[in-house]
Image (spheres, rainbow, N blue to C red):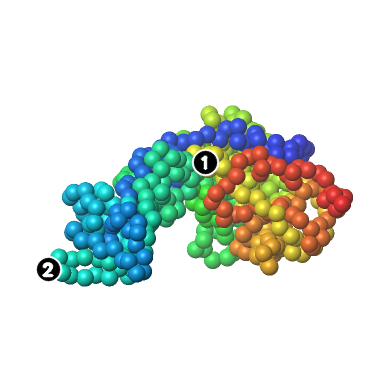
Amino acid sequence: MVERRKPINVKEAITRTMHFAKAGSVEYIPIEESYGRFLGEDLIADHHVPPFDRSPYDGFAIRSADTDHTSRNHPVELEVAGKIGAGSVFERPVTAGEAVRIMTGAQIPNGCDAVVMLEEVNEIERNGKKYIQIKRNIKAGTNISFMGEDTQKESILTQKGTYITPGIVALLATFGYKKVPAAKRPKIGVIATGSELLEVDEALEPGKIRNSNAYMIQSQITRAGGEALYFGQFSDDFDMCYNQVKDAIVKVDMLITTGGVSVGDYDYLPAIYAKLGCNVLFNKIKMRPGSVTTVAEKGGKLLYGLSGNPSACYVGFELYTRPAIRTYLHSSHPFLKKETAKLGADFLKSNPFDRFVRGYVSYQHGCLVATPVGLDKSNVVSSLAEANILILLPGGTRGYEAGMDVSVILLEDQEGITMEPFLDKDIDSRKDQRNDG
Ligand SMILES: Nc1nc2c(c(=O)[nH]1)N[C@H]1C(S)=C(S)[C@@H](COP(=O)(O)OP(=O)(O)OC[C@H]3O[C@@H](n4cnc5c(N)ncnc54)[C@H](O)[C@@H]3O)O[C@H]1N2
Ligand code: MOO
Ligand SMILES: [Mg+2]
């Protein structure tokens, strides 16, 4: 008799999975390798930036009070007491009637409180001494880049768990991080199952297909910030698959298998979880694709039994594995960002389960338009190549028409959101949006 599974809703499945998601450790890596990693600690400014008042222009540092009674007809003349370039400091306080020739980036000399640009002064020489003439009144603070105006000491610049962009690399360098505290990447094992699977470089044979999921999942792991460990593809043989899974678990932080998770004669994952004594969190979800997605836990490690169907496998990863990876990477926003978009085409087939339709979001006249791409079947691979979003169509009795507001999940997002807004309104809402008025 075929096993009858009890489906749970997406919200419950995510909640059960995230209960076992935990943060990993922190490692120090060279700053040159930090781009694309995730910060392991909050980045706190340990000094002001800039660390001193400095000149944003090539010009003359002056005492503004010297220009108090200056006008076009009554220019003031200041003696040039010296010259400093960026990196040098003027050795003594500047006194009344003096100016210092200063270059962009140089520290403002003591006594000065303004800078006049080179273009704004007349330079003259008399008796071997240099002078400048200024023809207007200069206010204190003019043309000064003030200490701390960029960042204040003690401020939190970037939170731990943040994806390190080139801009964050610049901040890390500014604050002297030759070694960067980075969240250690979780090691995610990947095992593909199926006697029909050919290696990627094998020629097609009757009844066989190439294993695309293993490579797709490895790239999804990399995009999410994890480190993929590929254990290979294995034919549908219980003992072989059991031993592979058993051996892999000890080498990884999480393990993903693809295929063999449904109710077929050669779908061995349920029996493997049972023999390993795993705590199966769920094995059926009210979602399409990916309803057979199974998540189990063993000794605190998450084991993902993703569907063999490529689209179902992809969606299962993004909904259940990706947030666990980001949590491991210390993110407080581990879920992909959701936005509201206009549906770009009718999607009239109703389904009692929540749908995560592969789609493409484009910008049209300042508006987000989400259009389904490719064939909407869970065994389809081509739609994945075009998709940059998942269009979330809550389950219900009616379909969706072009122009309706829909939620979309942004697949390339790096900022993320917390669990609450991700599970908000449209996941498991069960309401027919067309009754909203
Ligand atoms: N009687 C029932 N049959 C099925 C049910 C069900 O509830 N009752 N669920 C269907 C759903 S929904 C899905 S999704 C699939 C899930 O199948 P499995 O996870 O058991 O995966 P397989 O049977 O091993 O393969 C399914 C499909 O995917 C292809 N595949 C597998 N691995 C790969 C790979 N690495 N790369 C590319 N393609 C792969 C495989 O050839 C099959 O075509 O079950 C339904 N059946
Ligand atoms: O798990 Mo299946 O993808 O719902 O088609
Ligand atoms: Mg199967």
Which residue is at 76% across, 36% downward? 6
Q: State the residue at coordinates (43%, 35%).
A: 25
| Image position of 113 (left or right of 325) | left
Hey, what amino acid is under mark 1?
A: Ser
Image quadrant holding the N terminus, namely: top right
Report if residue 264 is visible in the image: no
Quarter assignment of residue 411: bottom right
Looking at the image, is 411 positioned above or below residue 7?
A: below
Q: Nearer the viewer, residue 26 or 209?
A: 26
Mark 2 or mark 1, earlier in chain: 2
Q: Residue 367: x and y, percent?
A: 69, 63
Q: Residue at x 34, y 41 (%)?
A: 47
Dot 1 surroundings within 10 Å: few (below 14), some, or many (20 or more)? many
- Secondary structure beneath dot 1 equals loop
Q: Amino acid at mark 2?
A: Asn
Q: Which residue is mark 2?
A: 127
What crowding class fits label 2: few (fewer than 14 Cα within 10 Å), some (14-19), or many (20 or more)? few
> Residue 383: percent from the left, percent from the top?
65, 62
Q: Could you give the CA–CA distance between mark 2 and mark 1, rounded to whole angstroms?
A: 67 Å
Q: What residue do we see at 20% from left, 61% from top?
A: 80
Kindly state the secondary structure of the residue where label 2 is placed.
Answer: loop
- Foreground of the two, 234 or 137: 137
Report the residue that reaches farthest toward the left.
128
Q: Which quarter of the figure has residue 154?
A: top left
For disc 1, the marked residue is 331
Taking the image as shown, residue 53 lies to the left or right of residue 331, namely left
Across and down, in percent, residue 59 comes to 29, 63
